[in-house]
């Protein structure tokens, strides 16, 4: 089955700096890659997703890049703010059966 | 106000007892999912249902059971056969292979 690896497990950046979280996947049939943000004690919230027919997608300070050849995708957050502090999860899916496989999460801490 | 609701937010259970977690959605989504979240392990799929009266086992179904009698409801029962049930349980739903939306979760603690 699909395996998703996520790095780093923790990341600390200063306010205003950029943060990058990377994920690799194993199943070449995967074609849907969402990113979720989870605040303490809450359910994950989708922040951005990308499908395999595009290489990059951007939404204000957040961007995701996808390299299908290398089977990896990354989340980029620019101009980080304290409210960006949370746990971020990547996931992969085949876009049909709707099953998602999740990475193990990255705890992002934005310090003042 | 559309969304997914889970109840209760916190649940305590004695060893040997079955307990049922509620998940309701008013998004008119066909598919619903149950995940278990443990520290440092991400989300693992327990059961999912793509249509009413049908459901499939996920990666860690042992010790759990579900039903899908109504489109908007997908309750999860944690049975006494689940050896390590203390965890954060998340319900999600989606439509047509699109994005999954999550509820707020239920934290289950076995005393």
Image (tube, coloured by chain):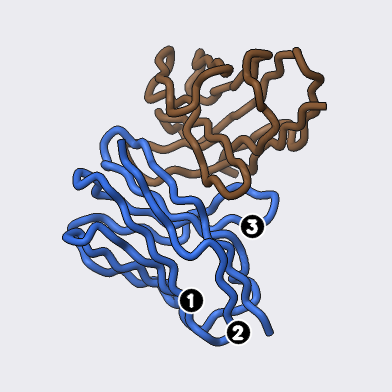
Chain colours: A blue, B brown
Q: Pointer 1 indicates a residue of which chain?
A: A
Mark 2 or mark 3, earlier in chain: 2
Compared with A104, A73 (above or below) is: below
Give SS at disc 2: loop
The x and y percentages for residue B21 are 66, 25
Mark 3 or mark 1, earlier in chain: 1
Residue A100 numbered mark, or none:
none
The x and y percentages for residue A42 are 65, 49
Provide the residue designation for mark 1. A19
Residue A39 numbered mark, or none:
3
Compared with B1, B73 (above or below) is: above
Residue at (60% x, 84% y) in the render: A14
Residue A15 numbered mark, or none:
2
Circles 3 and 1 on the same chain: yes
Q: Quadrant of the N terminus of chain B?
A: top right
Mark 3–mark 1 distance (CA, rounded to whole Å) = 17 Å
In this rendering, position of residue B23 left or right of residue A61: right
Mark 2–mark 1 distance (CA, rounded to whole Å) = 10 Å
Residue at (79% x, 23% y) in the render: B13
Compared with B80, A111 (above or below) is: below
The x and y percentages for residue B22 are 65, 26
Circles 2 and 3 on the same chain: yes
Circles 2 and 1 on the same chain: yes
The image quarter in which residue B54 lies = top left
The image quarter in which residue B86 lies = top right
Q: Pointer 2 indicates a residue of which chain?
A: A
Give SS at disc 1: strand
Q: Quadrant of the C terminus of chain B?
A: top right
Q: Pointer 3 indicates a residue of which chain?
A: A
Q: Are marks 2 and 1 in contact (CB under 8 Å)?
A: no
Give SS at disc 3: loop
């Amino acid at each position: 089955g699909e395996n998703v690896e996520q790095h780093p497990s923790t990341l600390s950046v200063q306010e205003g700096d950029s943060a990058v979280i990377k994920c690799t996947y194993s199943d070449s049939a995967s074609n849907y890659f969402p990113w979720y943000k989870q605040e303490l004690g809450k359910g994950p919230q989708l922040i951005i997703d990308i499908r395999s027919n595009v290489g990059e997608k951007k939404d204000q300070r957040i961007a995701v890049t996808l390299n299908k050849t290398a089977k990896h995708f990354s989340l980029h957050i620019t101009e980080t703010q304290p409210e960006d502090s949370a746990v971020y999860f990547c996931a992969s899916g085949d876009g049909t059966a709707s099953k998602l496989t999740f990475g193990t999460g990255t705890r992002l801490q934005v310090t003042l | 106000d559309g969304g997914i609701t889970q109840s209760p937010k916190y649940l305590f259970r004695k060893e040997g007892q079955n307990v049922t977690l509620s998940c309701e959605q008013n998004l008119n989504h066909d598919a619903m999912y149950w995940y278990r979240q443990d520290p440092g392990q991400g989300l693992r799929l327990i059961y999912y249902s793509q249509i009413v009266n049908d459901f499939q086992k996920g990666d860690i179904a042992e010790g759990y059971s579900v039903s899908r009698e109504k489109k908007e409801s997908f309750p999860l029962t944690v049975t006494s056969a689940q050896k390590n049930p203390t965890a954060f349980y998340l319900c999600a739903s989606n439509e047509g292979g699109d994005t999954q939306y999550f509820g707020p979760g239920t934290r289950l603690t076995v005393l």
